[in-house]
Amino acid sequence: MEVFELKQLLSENTYPGRGIILGHNEKDQTVIVYFIMGRSQNSRNRVFVETEDGIRTQAFDPSLLGDPSLVIYHPVRVLGDDLIVTNGDQTDTIRDAMAEGKSYIEALRTRCFEPDPPIYTPRVSGVACADGSYVLSILKSFDGDPTCNKRFFFEYDKPLAGIGHFIHTYKMNAQTPPSFEGEPETVRLHGTAQEIADEVWTYLNEDNKVSLFVRTVDRETKQTETVIINKNR
């Protein structure tokens, strides 16, 4: 198994799109990372704003906001001791299903990729659980064919200190960027929420990065540290 440094993966890909990292730092604290990138004015005109149960996206300049349907949503919501993170409004789909005692898989079986032809951006989602386990998923079209939706689920039931898993929407930068492929990438996670945020923000492409959320959670004390960075200030 190859374990990557975040510096390597982020510096080699100028447009991974929207990304989720779940795992544990060397202190075995749960780590949650979510970032957004953008190439269009509508995508770049955003900031993360903290809410009572997580974060939401918001237009930095409301006068420049175009279609809000795929850019304004709640990326992070907390439900009890679990944290849900996604790149779209499926955050609410998962939260509502879990509140009814259903699983995140049941929730995501009702959803598919985003309706943004010709890219058909994948929906990436994750749930960090109270016991330290976590799950990741991706819903994507069959090589750009909107008549076929593919769903992949990855479950990690034994947390490993200093290790996380990284999934993102796009494999690489291109006019029509191809969807992420394969298992989530295994990465090393070092340091506090601030140190992880500094590393990720430094190596995300300067032109395309928009906003970043990082949180660490001590599973015993429930103490959290949260960092939000917005390129638009």
Image (tube, rainbow, N blue to C red):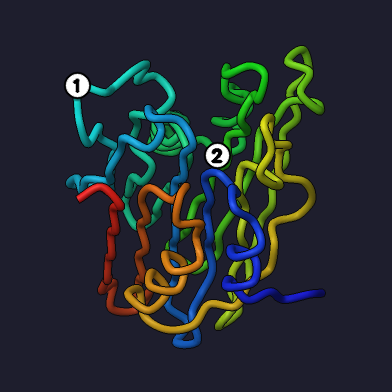
Residue 40 quadrant: top left
Residue 103's disc is: 2
Residue at the farthest bottom position: 27
**Residue 198, position as x, y percentages in the image:** 38, 73
Q: Residue at x 36, y 50 (%)?
A: 211
Instruction: Tell which of 94 and 32 is nearer to you.
Output: 32
**Residue 86, position as x, y percentages in the image:** 47, 42
Taking the image as drawn, is residue 179 in sight?
Answer: yes
What's under tag 1, amino acid-wise?
A: Ser
Residue 27 quadrant: bottom left
Residue 213 lies left or right of residue 171; in this view the side is: left
Give SS at disc 2: loop
Please state, as top left, top right, bottom left or bottom right, where the N terminus lies in the image. Answer: bottom right
| Cα separation between marks 1 and 2 | 39 Å
Counting residues from the start of the chain, the first of labels 1 and 2 encountered is 1
Residue bearing mark 1: 63
Q: Residue at x 29, y 72 (%)?
A: 222
**Residue 2, position as x, y percentages in the image:** 79, 75
Q: Residue at x 28, y 53 (%)?
A: 230
Give SS at disc 1: helix
Residue 122 lies left or right of residue 68; in this view the side is: right
Which numbered mark, 1 or 2, is in the foreground of this view? 1
**Residue 79 in the image: above or below residue 197:** above
What's under tag 2, amino acid-wise?
A: Ser
